[in-house]
Image (cartoon, grey):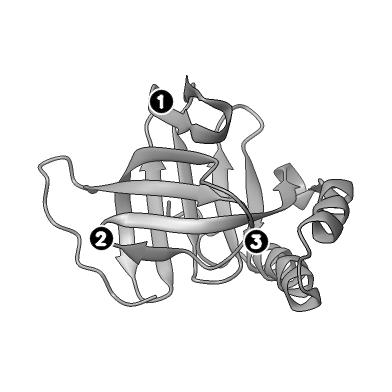
Amino acid sequence: MGHMSVPDTGRGSAPLIVEKGKWVGPPTSRWVADLIVAAPRRLAWRTPAGTVRARPRRHRTEATSVVEVSATTGGWWVATRLPGPRSRWKVDACTPVRIEDGVARFTDLDLDLVIGPGARVRLHDLGQMALRAREWRYPPWLVARALGGLAAALARRLLGWWPFDGSI
């Protein structure tokens, strides 16, 4: 992921279209967020509460109810900080985010890790990934990268490294 300059929009951030997909088929969601960090090995965006998120596969839209801040270091994961009294991080195993023409694209690889207070960790959707790995014929290296991406994000959280250092 190369350095990307952030134009001044008067809001302190630049608009960024975020597009999340699956290994097969069209994108699963698409929305406009605010780019807040764009530097080598650091990318973050804020999705304001009330943002309309299109769900093309389901032919519907939904609005976010809280502010979401998402970040990645260019690895095989995207972490989203979920606010609230028990603030936590949801980490999606995914392909590295690519930015092309103002659109941040990544492919969700089914597995999610929820890191709660005190670094309490829960792995979600392992069964779903196993099913899709067979149905959609994920290559073995892809499954390994998904698991490795979650392990790398967890290590960054345990060490207090960006984006888990409180700076965003």
Q: Secondary structure at mark 2?
A: loop
Q: How far separated are the C-alphas under marks 2 and 1?
A: 25 Å
The quadrant of the rendering that contains the N terminus is: bottom left
Q: Secondary structure at mark 3?
A: helix
Could you tell which of marks 1 and 3 lies nearer the N-terminus? 1
Vertical arrangement, residue 3 with respect to residue 56, above or below: below
14 left or right of 58 in image: left
- What is the x, y in percent for residue 52? 39, 26
Along the line of sight, the residue nearer the viewer: 133 or 146: 133
Res. 49 mark = 1
87 left or right of 101 in image: right
Going by the numbered disc 1, the residue's amino acid type is Ala
Q: How far separated are the C-alphas under marks 1 and 3?
A: 25 Å
List the residue tagged with mark 3.
157
- What is the x, y in percent for residue 41? 43, 74
Vertical arrangement, residue 90 with respect to residue 105, above or below: above
Label 3 packing within 10 angstroms: few (<14), some (14-19), many (20+):
some
154 left or right of 168 in image: right
Q: Residue at x 51, y 58 (%)?
A: 106
Going by the numbered disc 2, the residue's amino acid type is Asp
The nearer-to-camera label among 2 and 1 is: 2
- What is the x, y in percent for residue 73? 49, 69
- What is the x, y in percent for residue 53? 44, 30
Q: Quadrant of residue 86?
A: top right
Along the line of sight, the residue nearer the viewer: 57 or 35: 57
Along the line of sight, the residue nearer the viewer: 20 or 113: 20
Q: Residue at x 60, y 62 (%)?
A: 77
Res. 101 mark = 2
Could you tell which of marks 3 and 2 lies nearer the N-terminus? 2
Q: Residue at x 17, y 40 (%)?
A: 11
